[in-house]
Every structure is written in C-alpha cells, then in structure tokens.
Image (tube, helix red, strand yellow):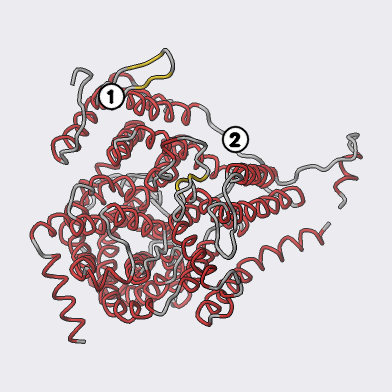
C-alpha cells in the first residue's frame, strides 16, 4: 500500500511539472477540438495528432497523447449529444438518451453528467491501473514466448468476437493485418519480404500511414457520400450547464455501476470500451424501475455508458503497460508513439523507467480533471465548431493529415501509402469488413511472429508446446471457447436458412 | 440446393446464382490477396530444421487467409446476403487526387522525361485543399479560396513556426 502511494507520488511529481501539465492541457484541448468534429472518432483523432507529439521529450509526448485520447473521447460524446452523430462506436449508446436530452433543452446537464461520470470513472480506474500494475508485471515475468503468443492469439480472438458483423470477415481482417505487418525486412535474417523491390517498402509499412488511411481518409470519403443536410444539430444556446440535485442523485448509481463494469471489461483485450458502454447501458435499462424512460432522455442512459467507456479506456492501458500488448486500436497507436520515442512497451517500462510509467498513469487522472474544469465551460466553442460546414471541414482535415504523415519521415511515399489505404478502407466498408481488427493485428504482427518463431525454436519444432505449457494452454482454451460461442449463433442462423428451403 | 432448378426455370442454363454478392466478391479478393502474398514470398527460404525461415510465417498466414477467403466466398455463394454496395466516384477520386498532388508537389517528382521541382509547403497545401474540395458537390469558389488560404496559413503557423519542423515553404526556398 505504501509502495503504491510512493509510486503515485512519484507519478504526480512528474505529471505536475509545469511543462507536463501544459502538455496534458494542450492534449486535452486539441483532442477535444478534433474529436468534436463529426465523423472523426477517437482512433482517427489520435492518429491525426500523433505527429505533433514527435518533437517532445518522451514523457511529455505520452502525457500529451493520453490527454488527446481523453479529449477525443469527450469530444466524441459532445457530438453524440448535440448532433446525434456518434464519433465512434463507444459513443453510439450515448446518442440514444443524450440527444433526446438535448432536444428537451437539457444538453448542458447531459454534457456535464457525461464529464462528471467520466471523471469519477477515471479516478477509480487510475487507482486500479496503479494497483494492478505491479502484480501483473510480475506475472509477465512468468511468460515465455509460447505464453506471449497464446495471449496475443487470445487478444485477436477477442477483437474478432467483439467486431460487429461476421466472425469470418473479422478473422480475414486479422490475417490480412498480420500479412501486411510482414512486409519489409525480416527480423532475424534481414531478408526483404513481399517488398516487390520497392525501396520504400523495405522498412515495412508505417503504422500511422495505415491508421490514417483506414480511419481518416476512408472515413472522409464515406462521409462525403452521405448528404450533409441531414445533420440534426441542436440549435439555440446551451443554457444551464450544471445538473440539478435530482440529476446527480439519479445518475450516481449509474455512474458507480458503469465504472465497475467498464473497469472489468476494459482489461480484456480486443476493444473493451465499446462493449463496456453497451453493457452498461443495457444493464441500467434492465435494473431500472421504469425502463420505458430509456431512449427518451433518461440521464442514467448517459451517465452509465460514459462512465463505463472511460473506465474501460483507462484500464485498457493495463495490458499495454504491463504485458506490452495493445488491447485496441488506440493503444496500438500508443505503441507506435512509444516505439518512435525508443520505448519498448512491456514490463520493463515499469522497472526501468518508473517516472514514465507512473507519470503517465497519474496524467490520466489529471487529464480527466482538466476535461471537467477547463473543457466543460468551453462547450460553447466546441458547438460553434460543429456549425462549420463539412464541405470546408474535410479538405482541412485532409491537408492536415497529409502534412502530418509527411512530417514523420519527410517521405512523400508515406502520403501515397496512406492514400492507398484510404481507398482500401472505403472498399472494406463496402464489403462489411471492419478495419479495427486489421489494425490491431498489424501492430501485434511482428511481436506475434517473433514469439512464435522463438517458441517453436525452443520446443525444437514441436507445435504442441502451445498446448502443453499450462498458462499457454489455458489462454488457447479460452480463445477457442470464445470463438465457438461467437460462431454458434451464426451457424445456427445459417442452418435455419438452409432448412427453411 | 433448389437454386439450380430456380434459375433453369427462368430459361438460363444450369448455373449457380450468387446469393450474397457482397460476401462472394469480398471473399474472392481475399483469396487474390492471399495468392499475391504467397507468390511474393515464394522466393524466401522456408523452414530449416526447427527454425522458421523468413518465408514460413507469411506463407502460413497467407494460406490461412486463402482458406478463410474461400469460406467467405462460399457463404456468399450459398446464403442470401446483401447486394453489392454502390461506389461513389466523385468524392474518392478528388480526395485521392488531392492527397497525391500533395505528395508529388512537396518534394518534387520525376518520372522519365516529366519532372516537377519541389514546390514547398505553401503551394502543396493550397493545391491539395483546392483539389480535394472538389469532392463535395456543395463546393463554392470564393468560400473555398478563402478557406484554403486560411488553412494554409494555419498549417504553416502550426508546423513550421510552432512545432519547428523543417519544411521548405516556397518553390524558391
């Protein structure tokens, strides 16, 4: 316990440094600014803003990125409440009741309850990250290559199970992502793989290019197809930001339950924040005395999912910081950022660079505090941003992304690669393939291959090693079980279809 | 399958109708991707002894992808699914053109006899903005020019002056 406090104190001394405080604030503001733009989700926001953190010292850069992350998420819920366009999957459920509240003239309380819920969830899960960090890091020491490989398989299977749509399509995306990650030089022999003799590909495909193409450009192209007139922006001034006493009483239970549910689901690899918000909303509706209020502006319907997705967002740092495995696309971007700063995510971060680890953990809490103290009163500015027509917004986003991508390596080829992935993303969407599992697999690819090769070498070519080592076998068993559970309804449906004929 | 009977009743020959085109063609593209990957990693050494060669993992995953792709295509063939979605041309075309214009102009470009010198950040940003804005049918000239100039100024301010990134601003340095 005292060790935990000492660690947190170390973290605060780092995070409260005026420079880092400034980076955190800047990150939260810029993150909200971009996150609020309709149709740009958390992943796209973080990908877009990644380049502006490159010039900073590592601790500052990661603190700023964490700030961007929370800011983007908060910005996304603002858009959900006011325009009824969810920025990303995590705020889909927030639309349901949040937008109804806004139409009843209660946009202010909806937004502040979302922020208060997020802050509370942030406080709890920061402590959780800090408390679980040390034991999980020692668990990581028990892991050999076989266990790491199996754990990553489990993570990818989670991503498959949680993806909307067909299980087969999601598996196909995982495999495509793994293949894409293998383009470039081989880790052990240095042989160029699948480079088609293009010099620029010999270093592999940059992660930011893929993310920017699939989540940024593809999104824009898709939005252009939809008519922009249909945007349902809540007009009029937002008055009365503060929730009433009754609002607070009504939502306190929902916030607490959302936090618990979110923290638990967030630790699971594969996109916990989305499930967390859905699960929290459904749970609230089920235990409510009058569930018919949900969907008509019930404040619990905003409080629960917003607390849950924030708690999950935060606890999803746990697998990244302790095991070095990113559980979702945003964390994958964090890995990219860490790698650029020469930090290898994993258990050694905590022991070798405690100030970085704890500084980041506490900065999450500070980031949430800033959202509530500084960001919430600025809601009027964010709203005016929503009035900028999309026809002017999207070319701005495009040039911003272009400059950002180019500035990473001063390479025009990277910009072209991102453009190609923009088209790929557009195609994937038209065929009901989801890009998130692809991106996750793309990041895990090199790690997975390395551990697979090492495990096979140690086991002298015996592939059963993944099933004979107990921890590894357990992880694989969970993965298989999940896959069967996810595939069953689909198979049953198909069989019924066949029998009907 | 009653499918063959249905189509032959319509006067066509005995052939399968694709019942879920979105899945079917999606699966075919996955198979093509897998074949491309297998072909591209074909010259890489595979297993030697217990150790994986550089070509082992790509071929392994490409093989799996081919299997999954075949299953996706098969499910599109056998089960009712959504039709192919329609593709817009205007939006994607201008957006991609704008991005490519930026890539070509920022550092210059030579392809055989044609070549353009590096034009710098200001013209590249302005051009990329003005080209990609064509993707929207609601585009208005005056407004677009003002917005392009403002965005260019903003980006120069942010990336060059605030973040101190080394950019050539103009064609004449």
Of residue A121 and residue B69, the one placed in the foreground of this image is B69
Query: Real-space Cα distance between discs 1 and 2?
Result: 31 Å
Q: Position of residue A369 (x, y in %)?
A: 19, 65
- Mark 1: give few (<14), some (14-19) or many (20+) Cα within 10 Å: many
Q: Return the mark for residue B115.
A: none
Q: Is residue A156 left or right of residue B6?
A: left
**Which numbered disc, 1 or 2, marks the residue that appears first in the sequence?**
2
Point out the residue furthest to the top here: B113
Q: Position of residue A431 (x, y in %)?
A: 59, 45
Point out the residue furthest to the bottom here: A1
Q: Is residue B74 left or right of residue A12?
A: right
Q: Is residue A21 above or below residue A238?
A: below
Q: Residue at x 49, y 26 (%)?
A: B90
Disc 1 designates what residue? B126
Of residue A249 and residue A358, the one placed in the foreground of this image is A358
Q: Chain of mark 1?
A: B
Disc 2 designates what residue? B86
Q: Is residue A63 above or below residue A154?
A: above
């Amino acid at each position: 316990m005292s060790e935990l406090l000492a660690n947190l104190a170390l973290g605060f001394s780092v995070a409260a440094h005026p420079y880092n405080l400034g980076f955190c604030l800047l990150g939260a503001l810029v993150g909200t600014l971009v996150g609020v733009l309709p149709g740009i989700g958390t992943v796209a926001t973080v990908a877009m803003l990644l380049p502006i953190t490159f010039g900073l010292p590592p601790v500052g850069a990661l603190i700023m990125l964490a700030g961007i992350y929370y800011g983007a998420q908060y910005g996304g819920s603002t858009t959900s409440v006011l325009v009824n366009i969810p920025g990303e999957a995590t705020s889909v459920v927030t639309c349901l009741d949040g937008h109804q509240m806004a139409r009843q003239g209660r946009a202010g309380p909806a937004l502040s309850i979302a922020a208060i819920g997020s802050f509370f969830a942030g406080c709890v899960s920061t402590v959780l990250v800090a408390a679980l960090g040390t034991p999980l890091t020692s668990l990581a020491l028990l892991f050999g290559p076989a266990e790491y490989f199996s754990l990553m398989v489990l993570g990818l299977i989670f991503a498959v199970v949680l993806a909307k749509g067909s299980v087969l399509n999601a598996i196909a995306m995982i495999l495509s992502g793994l293949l894409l990650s293998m383009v470039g030089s081989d880790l052990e022999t240095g042989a160029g793989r699948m480079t088609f003799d293009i010099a620029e590909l010999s270093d592999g495909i940059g992660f930011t290019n893929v993310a920017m193409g699939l989540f940024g450009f593809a999104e824009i192209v898709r939005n252009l197809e939809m008519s922009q007139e249909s945007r349902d922006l809540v007009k009029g001034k937002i008055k009365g930001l503060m929730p009433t006493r009754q609002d607070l009483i009504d939502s306190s239970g929902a916030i607490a339950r959302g936090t618990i549910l979110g923290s638990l689901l967030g630790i699971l690899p594969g996109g916990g924040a989305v499930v967390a918000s859905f699960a929290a909303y459904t749970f609230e509706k089920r235990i409510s005395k009058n569930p018919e209020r949900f969907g008509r502006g019930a404040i619990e319907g905003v409080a629960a999912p917003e607390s849950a997705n924030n708690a999950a967002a935060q606890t999803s740092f746990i697998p990244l910081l302790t095991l070095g495995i990113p559980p979702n696309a945003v964390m994958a971007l964090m890995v990219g950022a860490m790698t650029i700063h020469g930090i290898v995510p994993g258990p050694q971060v905590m022991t070798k660079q405690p100030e970085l680890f704890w500084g980041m953990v506490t900065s999450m809490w500070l980031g949430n505090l800033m959202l509530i103290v500084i960001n919430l009163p600025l809601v009027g500015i964010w709203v005016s941003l929503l009035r900028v027509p999309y026809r002017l917004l999207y070319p701005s986003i495009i040039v911003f992304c272009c400059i950002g991508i180019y500035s990473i390596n001063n390479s025009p080829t990277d910009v072209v690669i991102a453009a190609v992935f923009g088209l790929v993303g557009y195609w994937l969407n038209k065929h009901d393939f989801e890009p998130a599992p692809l991106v996750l697999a793309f990041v895990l690819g090199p790690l997975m291959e390395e551990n697979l090769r090492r495990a096979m070498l140690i086991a002298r070519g015996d592939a059963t090693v993944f099933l004979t080592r107990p921890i590894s076998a357990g992880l694989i068993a969970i993965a298989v079980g999940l896959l069967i559970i996810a595939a069953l309804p689909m198979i049953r449906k198909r069989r019924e279809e066949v029998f009907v004929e | 399958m009653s499918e063959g009977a249905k189509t032959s009743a319509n006067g066509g020959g005995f052939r399968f109708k694709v019942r879920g085109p979105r899945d079917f063609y999606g699966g075919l593209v996955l198979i093509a991707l897998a074949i491309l990957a297998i072909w591209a990693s074909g010259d890489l050494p595979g297993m030697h002894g217990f150790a994986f060669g550089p070509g082992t993992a790509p071929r392994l995953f490409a093989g799996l992808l081919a299997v999954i792709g075949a299953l996706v295509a098969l499910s599109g063939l056998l089960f009712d699914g959504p039709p192919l979605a329609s593709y817009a041309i205007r939006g994607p075309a201008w957006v991609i053109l704008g991005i490519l214009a930026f890539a070509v102009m920022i550092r210059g470009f030579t392809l055989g006899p044609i070549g353009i010198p590096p034009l710098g950040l200001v013209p590249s940003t302005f051009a990329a903005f003005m080209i990609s804005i064509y993707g929207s049918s609601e585009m208005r000239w005056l407004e677009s020019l003002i917005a392009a100039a403002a965005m260019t100024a903003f980006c120069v301010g942010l990336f060059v002056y605030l973040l101190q990134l080394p950019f050539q601003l103009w064609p004449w340095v």
